[in-house]
Amino acid sequence: MTADQPWVTIREGKAFSASPRDRRFWIDIDWAKAPEGKSSATVTIKGEAVIKAQLTAIRATAQQEREARGAFGGLAGEFSVPATAFTRSVAVDGVRWEAIPDYGRVDAAMSIFPVDAPSFTDPARAPRLDYAIYLATAGEYRVELVTSPTLEVIPGRKLSVAVGLNDQAPVVQTVFTPQDTAAQDFLGAKHAVNSANNARTMHFNVMVDRAGRHTLKVCMIDPTVVIQTIIVSNEEPKKTYFGPPAADHLAAPTGA
């Protein structure tokens, strides 16, 4: 097994089985040698047949590394942000976001306290969480909030929450809409799936006018919403149980 670029490293590891015909190789990138920007390489496997595999690596420029320091993000593909990794939490009239340890699929989730707090009609004036993210390109991005499969435990509170980017007006999404209440409610068609997954995913679209560092804002509307993870992507997200890993490619993320 060989590579045609010096920044591709190949290491043989322990095989899956005891068979002498079974061999396992690890392919990685030596980022100190990789050029900045997007580069391609070919890995050639020679055995009974010759197989060629294409590899693409994207290395951040020095400016991108500076802008992304302390932020979540990446240069390609989707990434996630732990709900507890906010850079700022804004409370309003004693209503605030707080962590719930060992919740759902994650080490800790975020929810509103007190749990019977009044709803907010204006997300711009509501309790919010700010997250530092780095986006490599402009365009439309999809933001997914992986929340708990909470039901409408307080009558009239439809489990609304808002997401915004920088100074843009936050976009409000609601779980228990007139069209979806029956499906989301107890014994509804979506309730079984949400309960089995121990999660409900809410979808938002935001427009990004430039590449670089941004502030993603999650604003309260109704109490009892519990956020486990935030997923950001400019392409159709892959269907996985835990979602993409937290993106610390460019710099170690900071939490609070």
Image (cartoon, rainbow, N blue to C red):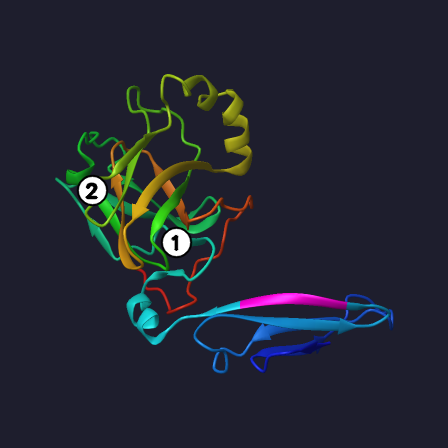
Q: Is residue 69 visible?
A: yes
Residue, x 71% and y 67% (percent of image)?
A: 52
Observer-nearest of 108 and 23: 23
Assign the C terminus to one quadrant of the image: bottom left
- Give the answer, above or below, for where 179 lies relative to 110: above
Front disc: 2 or 1:
1
Say what secondary structure mark 2 lies in. loop
Residue, x 40% and y 26% (percent of image)?
A: 151
User: How crowded is the residue under tag 1: few (<14 C-alpha within 10 Å), some, or many (20+)?
Assistant: many
| Residue 75 position by quadrant | bottom left
Is 54 included in the stretch rendered in magenta? yes
User: How many angstroms separate mark 2 from mark 1 (CA)?
Assistant: 19 Å
Q: How many marks?
A: 2
- The residue segment tinted magenta is 51-56
Which label is found at residue 127? 2
Give the main secondary structure of the magenta stretch.
Answer: strand
User: Which amino acid, by three-letter code, is at mark 1?
Assistant: Val
Residue 141 % position (x, y): 37, 46
- Give the answer, above or below, for where 161 lies relative to 23: above
User: Which amino acid, by three-letter code, is at mark 2?
Assistant: Pro
| Residue 181 position by quadrant | top left
Dot 2 or dot 1: first in sequence order is: 1
Q: Are marks 2 and 1 in contact (CB under 8 Å)?
A: no
Which label is found at residue 58? none
Residue 157 % position (x, y): 29, 24
- Give the answer, above or below, for where 102 lies relative to 42: above
Residue 39 % position (x, y): 51, 71
Say what secondary structure mark 1 lies in. strand
Which label is found at residue 81? 1
Residue, x 37% and y 42% (percent of image)?
A: 227
